[in-house]
Amino acid sequence: MALPQTFKAMVVSETAEKTFIREIKQRALNDLPAGELIIEVKYSSLNYKDALSATGNKGVTRKYPHTPGIDAAGMVVDSTTKIVAVGDQVTVTGFDLGMNTSGGFGQYISVPALWATKLPQGLTLKDSMSYGTAGLTAALCIIRLMASGLSKDAGEVLVTGATGGVGSVAVAILAKLGFTVVAATGKSSEHEFLTGLGAKAIISREEANDTSGRPLQKPRWAGVVDTVGGNILATALKTTKYGGLVAACGNAMSHELNVNVFPFILRGVSLLGVDSVEIPMRARQMAWSKLAGEWKVNIGSMVTEVSLEELSPKIDEILKGGIRGRVLVNLST
Ligand SMILES: NC(=O)c1ccc[n+]([C@@H]2O[C@H](COP(=O)([O-])OP(=O)(O)OC[C@H]3O[C@@H](n4cnc5c(N)ncnc54)[C@H](OP(=O)(O)O)[C@@H]3O)[C@@H](O)[C@H]2O)c1
């Protein structure tokens, strides 16, 4: 297959004044790192981590100029392995994509074959990136909660950061599975969106953020999907019922967690960590097949589609916690 010499990509560069600028540029295909697969990216999506990479967070991306994008879905156009063939449709999420490896905010990526997951039956490339890492992480949280014993008759399940990417997909999947979902949000204007996804009740960010200093609070939640960390996660632990389960996957509020042991030793609450970046391929494939099959939700209703040229303002918006649902990036336009 004849490949182009250059392709369009977002390039983030560090200036002499140590600021970071984003430009849409032509990049040479030859500049991509050597990889077993070259993938023509059709869709990517915006995740919180991409915004960190795009604004010079050295904990995410060490070297600039750099093309962010931890998600990519497209067609394999060159392969040096037998595991994945030219013409296969694949998704790549996590590993080092978009961190220190040129990412999905460019029309081509070059990656090891082991990073690629074949597109599951039941999803288009567009669907897969409408979910993206956020949807995959929501599925992994719910898999973890259910594998640890959460059942739909156990009581209310809280989702924090509910209008965000992970949160909104988690609300929709849990509601589809018959759980009683309570959404915690800072956006009073988005209650209708959340009830539309299936939330039975909504609490404000303030209500989810106990500042009383009390070691325990009235128990309410059978389960929690927490996407924000910080004192909201600490509050979730203090308000989880006896034997309840809390899945923690994010730090949009804070990476700090100031907790006491009482939820664990008096109520038997379990804190379950969820990572989508390094999870083994079998767990990743299982989560994708759930998203493509019995857990498939109306993901299109949560998506704002943008071109590469329209992406930059969305990056600023996600950093301020202002995004509703998912931002899909169409690389073909
Ligand atoms: N563990 C993993 O593998 C993994 C994978 C994906 C994402 N994550 C993490 O999960 C988190 C969510 O990711 P995302 O892509 O869903 O991001 P997102 O779309 O920006 O959603 C985050 C949501 O959190 C709420 N929020 C934002 N700032 C807040 C603050 N200061 N205090 C309290 N709530 C705040 C907002 O929702 P409301 O306005 O509705 O409250 C916001 O929409 C991020 O920290 C991300 O890094 C982790």
Image (spheres, helix red, strand yellow):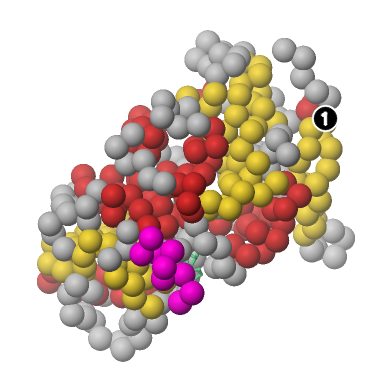
Image side of residue 324 versus residue 218, left or right? right
| Corner quadrant of residue 315 | bottom right
Q: Which residue lies furthest to the right in this view?
A: 16
The stretch drawn in magenta includes residue 258: no
Residue 320 rendering spot, x and y as whole percentages: 59, 69
Residue found 41% across the figure and 29% down from its top? 122
Say which quarter of the image contains residue 19: bottom right
Residue 132 x/y as whole percent: 50, 43
First to last magenta residue range? 188-196
Q: In this view, does 91 lie above or below 18?
A: above
The x, y position of residue 4, in whole percent, is: 80, 23
Image x and y of residue 42, in percent: 64, 33
Residue displayed at 41% across by 71% down = 191
Q: Mark 1 points at which residue?
A: 6
Quarter of the figure with the C terminus: top right
Is residue 278 in view?
yes
195 in the magenta segment: yes
Nearer to us in this view, 182 or 34: 182
Dot 1 falls on a residue whose secondary structure is strand
Quadrant assignment for the N terminus: top right
